[in-house]
Image: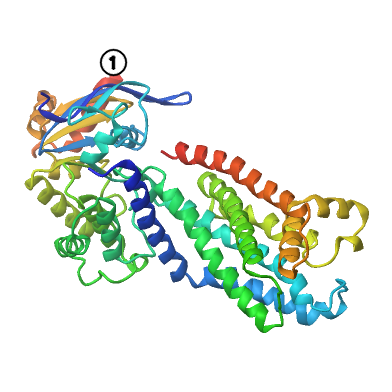
Amino acid sequence: MPTASIQVKGLQKSYKQLQVLKGVDFEVEKGSIFALLGSNGAGKTTCVKILATLLKPDGGTAAINGFDVASSPEKVRQAISLTGQFAAVDEILTGRENLILIAKLRYLDDPRQVADDLLRRFGLTDAADRRVATYSGGMRRRLDIALSLVGNPQIIFLDEPTTGLDPEARIEVWKNVKELAGSGTTVLLTTQYLEEAEQLADRIAILHEGRIIANGTLAELKQRFPAAQVEYVEKQPTLEEIFLAIIGKREGK
Amino acid sequence: METTKNRFFTDISVMLGRSMRHVFRSMDTIVTVTITPIAMMLLFVYVFGGAIDAGTDNYVNYLLPGILLMAIGSGVAYTAYRLFTDVQRGILERFHTMPISRSSLLWGHVLTSVVSNAISVVVIVLVALIMGFRSSAGVLPWLAVAGILILFTLALTWVAAIAGLSAKTVDGASAFSYPIIFLPFISSAFVPTESMPTVVRVFAENQPVTAIVESIRALLSGRPVGNDIWIALAWCVGITLVAYAFAIRAYKKRG
């Protein structure tokens, strides 16, 4: 039996001539937060879309709870939830109606109660009966994540959850994500913010030009930082420096 | 676990509830699909009507079928718009990663189009009654009229679905409806085709709106419908089948 919630092996994907994923491998352990870190266009979203059954891979395999995403998408959809790059909320409905809609589609017994609980948990109770069109960016994102939690899916994909948010809203989202992992949910998040990966993730994989070029805990990644340079820096290396150093080294080859 | 078939109908009803809320919450939708055709009807009856010789003493009776088709033509543009918004906002992607019936979102939009267009048709018919529209038709002809209008709505809705699913911009999503709204003008909807120059007349007499308008007119006035109804049905069913195939293809492409 596989112990990993997510298993990705040799994943490949091209859009016409452009090869976006050139053989991506990683595993995500159950109940952990895994960050896929990379710059724009590195293939993070493509990776998440394949895992969320929205795209078919050209090569390699991806499995969620042991089910192949390409051959048993229905089984995979039972276990996952996606929070895409842009808040997928219904602007014309209220926050509460959005949550009830998803709860109904997930065949939950008491959609109203589920909505009330999540509204409270995400600090949206006061805004619950306002149309989402009137929400701020941070509120939309919180509602978006709340929608993904309806029905307690085992695995949650967060594609750049804080892109475009102000610092305050970002910290709020971070708090919510940390609580998630605390409750046993497996989280795969993509980010281009190094600090975000550093703050949230148990393990970090760096996706660069279609391949994973580094994968480990923050401590492990820090060890890979070239020792010779450590002598000259006074502070601990930030992940940003690690990131740039690793990329630079590979490109130098 | 629920059977797939049960899920399909339950999911569709949830989706229908959602997009009907969209319809009732956007004033511009209601204005465009109901008030605009009513304004057209008032304009044609009370402003142009006196100068138009349609060979009838009750111009409202003559005009109503064309007005209903125009209302449906502008109504389906909103289906394109709503589908486009769902694609752009990532709502379609969210639904497609959930364990729900795949096509329920699309069917929810299509049924919403049928229901909301039916509502605006009823409102327009009521206004027409106040303006002097009278029909001697019994229950069966009325049902036949309802059937034709529903088929016409379905045909245009599937065309709208293609536009909504494949458009790159919001303008593109609704642009397809302009020719549809314009078609009744080059048909027998407002004036008899006999008054038109030959080229225009040939076009007018062989495009779907004329056959549909003539069928509805005949049904409502208790005249025999003749071949028109078969031509009308053939157009509606033909457009529906072709547009459905393309819309489903566009839908699958979207994940």
Specify the amino acid type for callout 1. Lys
Across and down, in percent, residue B217 comes to: 74, 65
Q: Is residue B92 left or right of residue B137?
A: left
Across and down, in percent, residue B51 comes to: 87, 78
For residue B95, above or below residue A112: above
Residue A194 quadrant:
top left
Across and down, in percent, residue B35 comes to: 60, 75
- SS for dot 1: loop
Q: Is residue A26 left or right of residue A134?
A: left
The residue positioned farthest toward the top in the image shown: A253
Across and down, in percent, residue B107 comes to: 45, 50
For residue B184, above or below residue B136: above
Task: Give the residue at mark 1.
Answer: A253
Q: Residue at (50%, 63%) from the top-left corner?
A: B115
Viewer-proximal residue, B240 or B18? B240
Chain where mark 1 sits: A
Residue B34 quadrant:
bottom right
Q: Which image quarter is the C terminus of chain B in?
A: top left
Q: Could you tell me if residue A38 is visible in this image? A: no
Q: Is residue B119 left or right of residue A178?
A: right
Q: Which image quarter is the N terminus of chain B in?
A: top left
- The coloring applied to the image is rainbow
Q: Is residue A111 left or right of residue A41?
A: left
Q: Could you tell me if residue A69 is visible in this image? A: yes
